[in-house]
Structures are given as C-alpha cells and as structure tokens.
Image (cartoon, grey):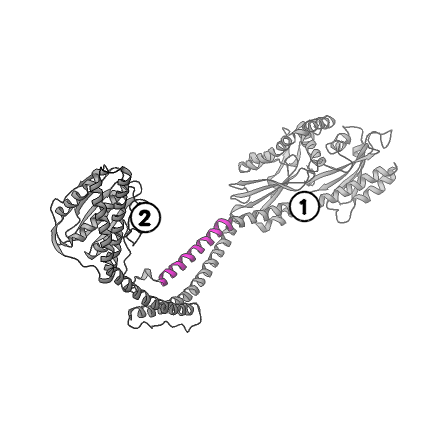
Amino acid sequence: MTSANTYPEDKGLIHRHQTLSYKLSAGLAGFILLLLVAALIAIWFQGKPLLVEESLAKNKQIGISIVLALGERMAKIEGITAQIANFAKAAPKDPTLFQKVIPSLLNISGLEHVIAGGGVWPEPYLFDKKMERRSFFWGRNSGGELEYYNDYNIPAGPGYHHTEWYVPARYTTKDEVYWSRSYTDPYSLQTMVTCTAPIYLNDNFIGVSTVDLMLDGLSKILSKLTAQAGGYAFIVDRNNKFIAYPDPNQVITKRGGIPLSDNPNEQGYPDFVTVKEFSEKHPSFTPVANFLTQLDTGYSNKNRINRNLLLKQAQLIDQESDEITSSESQLISSQLLRRLQKKSQISSIGLLRLSDDLILDGPTNVEVFSMPMTSWKVITVFPTDTITRQATKISINLSLMVVLFLCLFSIAASFLLRRLTRRLTTITGDIRLATENTENQKSRLNDDIHDEIGVLSYWFNRRTEQLIEAKTNAEYASQAKSKFLASMSHELRTPMNAIMGFTKHAIKKLDGKIDDKPMEALRTVDQNAEHLLNLINGILDVAKIEENGIELATSTFFINPMLYDLHAQFSSIAHRQHLSFNLIPLDHDIEFVGDINKIKRILSNILSNAFKSTKKGGVSIKPEIIDHHRFQIAIIDTGTGLSQSDVEKLFQRFAQVKDGIGAESGTGLGLYLSQRFAHEHDGNITVESEVGIGSIFSLTLPYEN
C-alpha cells in the first residue's frame, strides 16, 4: 500500500532526533565508537599476538646466540686440531720434534681454561714399524700445566685406535672433524668432549689429531644469556645426556651396578644423566625427553636415500670399537652424514609447551636448537606467563592511549560540529522566515560570510529569484492554458460526439449488410473515437479543476444501491470477457453525504482498469465498515498486478504503467482525477498489488454514524 508523504506546514517543528546536529553528533559518536572498537580489536587480536610472537622471536634469538657462542669456542678448537693434524702430516717422524711442537700448539694464550689436552695418534705401526702404538698426548695436571702421558701406548688393552673418539674419524673427509660423545672427568667432574681431525697422506688415512675441550663454564654462559628473559637453558649431547644444567646436582648420578650401556668403563664413577633418566625422576619433563629421543629417528626416516650408506657405515664403526654400541654407531654415522651433506646449520627444530616446569614452577615454552657439527641440542625454557603478561601490559597501555586520543578528538570534533550546526540553524531560520513572509518575495539570506555556507546562501538567493520569475511565468501560462481549454470544451466535444453518433448509427444500420472487413473498420473508428473523447474529457476536466477547482453536487444517498447500479453496468463486460463479477453488499447500509456522480466515477475508473488488467479469474466489489467514522469500498481483481515502481506513480497525471492496468490504453488521467475526487470528499485511494497475483484498490471515505 502506498500513500503520499505528509509533512507539517511548520517544518521548524521537528523532533530532536531529527535535527542535523543530533544526527551529526550521533554519527560522530558512532564513528568514534567504530574507531575505538576497530583499534581495540587491532590491538588485542592483532597487536597482542604480534607482541607474543615478537617475544618468542627474541627468545629464539637467545637460543641462536647460545649456539653461536658455543660454536665460536668450538670453531677455535677445530682450527687448533687441524693445525696439529697438518703438522703431523708434514713433519718428519722425529719424537723429539713432536714433543716440542705439539705442546706449543695446544698451549694457546687465553684458552688455558678451555683446552684440557690433546695430541697426535698415528695408525698402528705407521710412526714406528716396531711399535703398534706410538701416540703423543699431553693433558693438564692439577696445576694447569700440560704434561705428557704415555699411558695410551701401553700394549695391554684394546688400544686408542679402537676408542669412540678415534674410529669415526676414519670415515670423515680431509676437511672435516669429528666430535666425540661428552664425558665427565672422574676427578674434577668437568664435562669434556674431544675434537678429532683425520690425518691423510696421499689420500691414505694415517691417524688423527685431537684436542680435548673442557665444557666448564657453559652454565654461566647460558645463565647470562637467558637471565634477562626470565628463563634458563640447558644442553644435551648426541646421546641426549646432559652437558649443562642450571642445577648440576639434579643431573649428576653415580654410574655403577647395572650398566646403562654395554660399555663397562661407564660404571662406578660420577656422570651426567640422560633425558630419559631425568624424566623417570621428574615426570613433567617427559614430553621434552620423548621429543629429544625421537629427533634422531626422525632424521634417519627423512634420509631414506642415504639409509643404506648410513647403516653400512654404522656397522663398520660398531665392529671397530667396543666402546660404541650399535645404536650409538647409527647416531655417529648420522652425524657424519649430516656434515657430509652440509646440514650443520643452526636451526630451531622444535617448540613445546609444558604446563609445569621443574625450575620455573609454571607453564613454559621449550624450544630446541640444533648444534652444528656435534649433534648437540641446546634447549631454552622461558615462562609463558612472562611473555603473555608483557604483551598484555603493552596492549593495555596502547588501549588507554587510543581511548585518550579519541576522547580528545571527539571533544574537538564536537566543538566544530556545534559551530557548523549553529550556522545551519541560523540559515534554516532565515529560510523559514522568508517562506512564511510570502508577501515579501525579496527576502534574502545573509551571504556576506565567505565560506561554503555563504556560497550556499548566495546561490539560494539566486535560485529564489529564478523561481519567483518562473512561478510568475508559470502561473500566467497556466491561467492562459486553462482559459483556452475551458473555452474549447464545446468545440472539442461537439465534433467528437457527432463522429461517435454517426459511427454508431452506421454500425447499427449496416450490421449484416456489409462485409466483415468494412464493419470491423467502423467498430475500430467507434472505439478510437470513444477513447479520444475520454482523453478530451479528462484533459478538459483537469483544466476545469485547475481553473475553477472541483465543485461537488452534494446529496444524500445509500451505498448499496449505488454499488448495485455499478455491478449492473459492468456485468456485460464481465460476461463478454468470461470473468466472474461479485458484489458483497454491506450488512447494514450506510447513508453517505457527497457527490454521487463523483463517487461513481471513481469506482467506474477503478472497475474499468480492473477488467482491462484481468484475463482470468474475476473482479469483486467488497464494501466494509472500518470504524464508527470511516468505511471503505475495495475492488479486488486477479489481474496482472503492479510493480512497486508502478504503484508509486499510479496517481500522477498522464502516468502510464509498464504492465497491468493502462498498459494497453488509457489517458493517464483517470486515477489522478479519481484521487482528486476522493480527497475532495476527505477520503483517499490506496493500492495493494503483487505482480502475477492481482490488485486491491480501496476507496476510504468518512461518514457520520
């Protein structure tokens, strides 16, 4: 149902929520609120995760720094080991020369607390054909001085060429070194590791050089690098045995009783525990122990192409040394293979989250880093709460800053909007006064202020002058047109009535006496003449209304008899179109005071349109009392229906719809005049329509009960 918009004559009387200042203020508040929500969402759902990620990245960098610090120390040892190997390869086989040069290569200034010893270990009978074992080894005594040890050359025992730090060197290339498993000095309890470099002469393996590296002080390095972030770090070797831990007492054990491996030398002396042994004592550490245990297996599975080479090399290493178990030989072979494939870069190989940490006593992030060359793992542990708490604190500070900024921005924007709306209110008042003062058409707005509102006022004044001039011209032209059309009423209607009368008379006299084609032509002339007369009548009625207004011939009549007359008038049309035509009269008839001809004309126009638009089904007339002061007459059809756009222009002058009523013929004035007639009776015509379903035209009129 559509109806025209109605406004109070006094447009200044509007509600507060309809004012521009209210809408701008509400829009500003909504915009600021939207900005605030967007900023808070960005801070808490984007910024905070980024801060957490940044903290994790910093923690990761700490782990890399630890690996780099260790790598720097170990790189120096590798260089010294290589120097000793080069000397042994190039020097003549003079024991005196060896005993003079090797200690000088080991005794590097600044590294006395790092290098525990070292030497040269020739292959059996290569240095002296009469001696199977002829090594040159120096170790630091209790005073820190390098002292020569000949114990390894004693014929008894398996010999140094079957040790864990010697055998794998046979399978390294010329430019590589091998790092042994970590071991604990039984007297000083210092953790140590041996760097072994192979010695090749004319591509023949002739022995190794070694440097023993003391790992004392690693815990201090780890503590210094992790203290600022509130965490700690520890290191495990190739066999997942602890090398460094914040509390050494928790990771030291006494090897004895049932051996932990098939190496009898590991019994009966202090040593560091493995991660598996540590997790058995501290179950919260189990996820870390499981992850570290699976790393080596995972590497082997990822290198299926080199699987055969790895197993073959591991078998040889296992056979040549009683100190190396079959499982450890695979780890050693895997370590050598990684170095051969240049896969010894520093990297993070895993991030775990523990719900409870033994030292930090709370949830932690545990990250594992690979140690180049040695297959060690550096593990950093940082509290999760610290990372989250710091990110939350920064997010809260940012949120407070955003809220403060938006508050200041809203105050400034409100002040500017207030000034703007005050100017607009002043202009609105001036326009209202100019509108109310109809006698003084020269009223002007103040356009002296040189800004956008001043320019608006200037062009408003110019437009007002043009409208006044156009209104004057239009009124003069309208009056002239109305007078002309009113005076032409007789001259236009008389010829058309004559044509229609002659045509109808000819049709009546000649029906059945002439051929169908001429008779059809006469009927076409009659129909078009009637259509043209309706158009002329509509135009003349509009002109008459605009000239003199609508004059009502008021009388008192009953509604039901009037509707019976209309039903009888249109029944023949319904019969001809094979449509049903129903009238449901009022149970209690209404006595109405008005112009019966105008009311019948309204309903006739609606009925005519209903029959034009209806091809099947039918048309119904249904009067209904709405309340004690109003009643309506509804005309219901099952025609083509109307679109919303057609309904909106239905009561405009000369309006033609695209489909439905009036699409085939019509003046475009019938419904316009009908609505005018309805308004003169203080009534209204409304429409409810749906395309393909039909339409309901309702004439609502007032009456006195």
Position in image of residue 442 (x %, y %): 33, 73
Residue 657 badge: 2
Front-lying residue, 225 or 682: 682
Structural crowding at the residue carrying mark 2, measured as other residues with C-alpha within 10 Å and reported as few (<14), some (14–19) or many (≥20): some
> Taking 370 as reference, is 396 left or right?
left
Q: Is residue 310 above or below residue 188?
A: above
Would you say residue 491 sits in the magenta stretch?
A: no
* Residue 466, position as x, y percentages in the image: 37, 68
Whichever of labels 2 and 1 marks the residue nearer the N terminus, that label is: 1
Instruction: Report the mark closest to the observer, 2 or 1.
Output: 2
**Element type at mark 2:** loop
User: Which residue corresponds to mark 1?
Assistant: 68
- Image vertical order of residue 300 relative to residue 554, above or below: above
Decide if residue 98 is in sight here. yes
Q: Using a 10 Å C-alpha cutoff, classify the residue at mark 1 as few (fewer than 14 neighbours), some (14 to 19) or many (20 or more).
A: some
The amino acid at mark 2 is Val
Q: Which residues are magenta?
A: 20-48
Give the distance between the C-alpha atoms of the residues marked 2 and 1, in whole angstroms. 84 Å
Q: Is residue 24 magenta?
A: yes
Q: Position of residue 196 (x, y in %)?
A: 75, 37
Task: Tell me: residue 626, above or below residue 458.
Answer: above
What kind of element bears circle 1? Answer: helix
Label ID, residue 662: none
Q: Looking at the image, which is closer to me, 95 or 459?
A: 459
242 with respect to 643 (left or right): right
